[in-house]
Structure formats: C-alpha cells, structure tokens
Amino acid sequence: MSQQQRQTDISIDAIPVDVANSQSADVDPAEVPAEIASLTRKLASEQPPTNPLVVLKAARWWYIYGKGGTDPAFQWAIEWARHLASDTPSDVDQFDAFLEYLVTVGLANEKHDLR
C-alpha cells in the first residue's frame, strides 16, 4: 500500500479517495493537493491546459472533495474539457463563477490574480 493511500481509502487508480472527507460544503485551501491547486489555477489562466485528461483529473478531485456536481471548479473543468473535445465556445458566465469560487475557497486573493 502506498504511503499516500490509507486502508480506508477507495481508489480506482493511484489517486486515493478519502470517503469520509468527500463532497463537503467547505474546501480548505491547505488540503488541496499542490498538483490540483496548480491545475486549477492553470484552468483560470490565459493559457489553460489543453489535455482533456489533465483537466478531468482536476475535475475529479473537485467533484470528490468539493460540492460534487454543483462545485464551480468541477463544472468549469468539465466545461473546459467539453470545449477541448468539441472545439465549441465555452460558457463565459460559468468561467466567471469559477473565478469567484477560487477567491471564495482561498486559492486566490482576487480574480485578477488568476489571469
């Protein structure tokens, strides 16, 4: 068993899922893994990731540890992956909600810090 995965974790791959802490209403920025925080900030940047699998990795984390399907970071990651897969415009209002959410959870001080 890896050092990161505990016996009570459930996982379909190398990313552990701590069921006891899943889909909470509050996300503590200190508990967001560095890789996920970095991917999430990149999703808010002028040059977001272009690999849908990388984007879906962030989406997965936010779905599990955020607010599930209603989590704005999850919703934006899915929207961006859809954009990458279909080459259709993305939802600007959803992007703004995502930026606001990142400020609310403490991954940025201001929206403009993310761009």
Image (cartoon, rainbow, N blue to C red):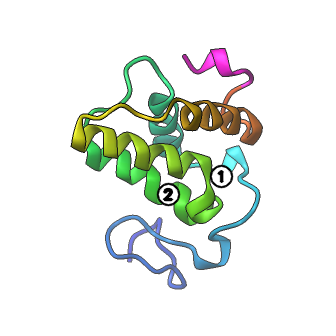
Disc nearer the start of the sequence (1/2) = 1
Q: In this view, does 41 lie above or below 56?
A: above
User: For residue 103, which quarter of the picture?
Assistant: top right
Residue nearest the viewer, comparing 77 with 18: 77
Q: Return the residue at label 2.
A: 61
Q: Residue at horizontal 32%, vertical 38%?
A: 83
Residue nearest the viewer, comparing 109 with 5: 109
Instruction: Check contact, mark 1 vs mark 2: CB within 8 A.
Output: no
Kind of residue at disc 2: Trp
Which quadrant of the rendered structure holds the C terminus? top right
Residue nearest the viewer, comparing 88 with 73: 88
Give the magenta-colored segment's residue range: 109-115
Place of residue 78 in the rendered image (x, y in percent of width and height, measured from the top left)? 42, 50
- Crowding around mark 1 (Cα neighbors within 10 Å: few <14, some 14 to 19, many 20+) is few
- The number of callouts visible is 2
Kind of residue at disc 1: Glu
Q: Residue at horizontal 27%, vertical 33%?
A: 50
Disc number for residue 22:
none
Place of residue 52 in the rendered image (x, y in percent of width and height, measured from the top left)? 28, 45
**Is residue 102 shown in magenta?**
no
